[in-house]
Amino acid sequence: MATKTDTTPRQTASARREALIDAAVEHFAETGLHGTAVSAITADVGITQPYAFSLFGTKKGLFLAAVERGFDRVEETFREAVANAGEQGPFDAMKESYAGVLEDRALLLIQLQAYAASGDDEVRDLVRRRYAELYDLVRELSGGATPDELTQFFAAGMLLNVAAALDLPDLLLNDTWLADCLRPHQ
C-alpha cells in the first residue's frame, strides 16, 4: 500500500510559536481568557495542545503572550508613525496612526479582553506594566507632549477602542472632544 507523502515544508519552532500567538490573539480577542479553548487555537495552527503547553506552560501563559503581542503591535505602530512623521511632528503622527490600530478588530478586542481579565494578578501585573511602558513610550516619542495632552491622547484612544469594538462610527465621527483630541496641532 502506497503512503501519501506530505510535501508541506516543515515550520521552524519559532514560526510555529509565532503562528500560535497570532491565532491566540484572534481567539482570545473573541472569547477571552476563560471562554477560549486551547484546542481551537491549536487546530487553527495544526499543532497539538501538548506542544502548545510545552511552549507556554498554561492557557494563561498563551493568553499573556497574546496580550504582549497586542501591546507590541501598538508600540510598533507608534514607532513607525514617528519614524515617518515628516513636518506634522511625532505626536500628531502617532494620533493619526491610531486609525490603523482601529481597523484591526482583533487588536482592539485583545486589549479589552486584557483589561477584563485583570482580576487575575498575573494578567493585571502584565497589563499594568505594558500600559505604563506604552505611556512612557508615547511621552518619549511625542517630543514634549504635556501631561494633559498625554491624558487626552490615552482617554481618546480608550474611547475609540470601545466605540470601534461596539461598531459606533457615529460616535467616532461626531464627538467634538474626541476630534479635538485627535486633530493634529495647528
Image (tube, rainbow, N blue to C red):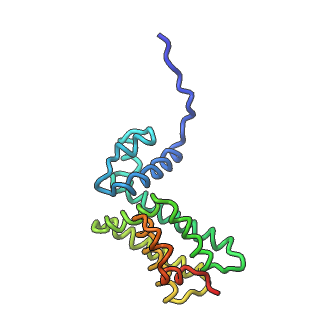
Residue located 33% across and 52% down the image: 59
Q: Position of residue 93 (x, y in %)?
A: 62, 75
Task: Please state if 100 lies on the left or on the right of 84 as rendered.
Answer: left
Q: Position of residue 141 (x, y in %)?
A: 60, 78
Q: Is residue 144 above or below residue 109?
A: below
Return the residue nearer the eye: 148 or 71.
Answer: 148
Q: Residue furthest right?
A: 87
Q: Residue furthest top?
A: 1
Q: Is residue 75 above or below residue 183?
A: above
The quadrant in which residue 168 appears is bottom left
Residue located 32% across and 47% down the image: 37
Residue located 49% across and 89% down the image: 148
Task: Please state if 100 lies on the left or on the right of 61 as rendered.
Answer: right
Return the residue nearer the eye: 145 or 128.
Answer: 145
Q: Position of residue 53 (x, y in %)?
A: 36, 47
Task: Please state if 185 lies on the left or on the right of 31 as rendered.
Answer: right
Residue located 49% across and 80% down the image: 178
Q: Is residue 37 above or below residue 155?
A: above
Q: Position of residue 16 (x, y in %)?
A: 49, 44
Return the residue nearer the eye: 104 or 83.
Answer: 104
